[in-house]
Amino acid sequence: MAIVCLPRQFHVTVVENIEPQDLNLAKWVFPAYLALAALFVVPIALAGQMLLPASMLPDSFVISLPLAHAHPSLALLAFIGGASAATGMVIVACVALSTMISNDMLLPWLLRRKNTERPFE
């Protein structure tokens, strides 16, 4: 369902897919990757709730925890990692949307326009 709803997921799964055998690998690697990433969510959430003030937003736990324990370099690393991930998602989404627009809107319009300019063929 994500392939239909998210241009980014469609681009990564369909457009960037070179070999059909890669999907067999992705069937277990992608869920394993998500599970591995989820392993860090619960400890960070629990540490943030126990060690930070109640007024602290949960969205900022990853940066606030190192700052609260005098580790600004770790907070900077978390910030750079988050900015990098967000930038990568925006870039892939823009590439996917531009590919969809050019393939489904621009090129058909140009082909129709070119065919109407040559009525005697």
Image (spheres, rainbow, N blue to C red):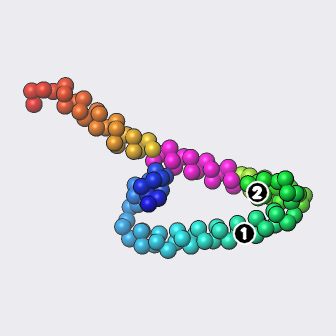
Residues shaded magenta: 81-96
Assign the C terminus to one quadrant of the image: top left
Q: For the point 88% across and 57% down, which residue is it?
A: 53
Residue 14 percent coordinates (x, y):
40, 58
* Quadrant the N terminus occupies: bottom left
User: What residue would you read off at disc 2?
Assistant: 58
Residue type pointed to by label 2: Pro
Residue 50 on the magenta segment: no
Answer left or right for 18 relative to 8.
Answer: left
- Marker disc for residue 114: none
- Specify the farthest residue to the left: 120
Image point (9%, 27%), residue name: 120
x 48%, y 53%: residue: 6
Q: Is residue 82 visible?
A: yes
Disc 1 residue crowd, few under 14, some 14–19, many 20+, Cα 10 Å: few
**Residue 71 seen by the camera:** no
CA distance separating discs 2 and 1:
12 Å
- The x and y percentages for residue 99 are 41, 44
Q: Nearer the viewer, residue 59 or 7?
A: 59
Q: Quadrant of residue 10?
A: bottom left
- What residue is disc 1 on? 42
Residue at the (42%, 55%) spot, across then down = 4
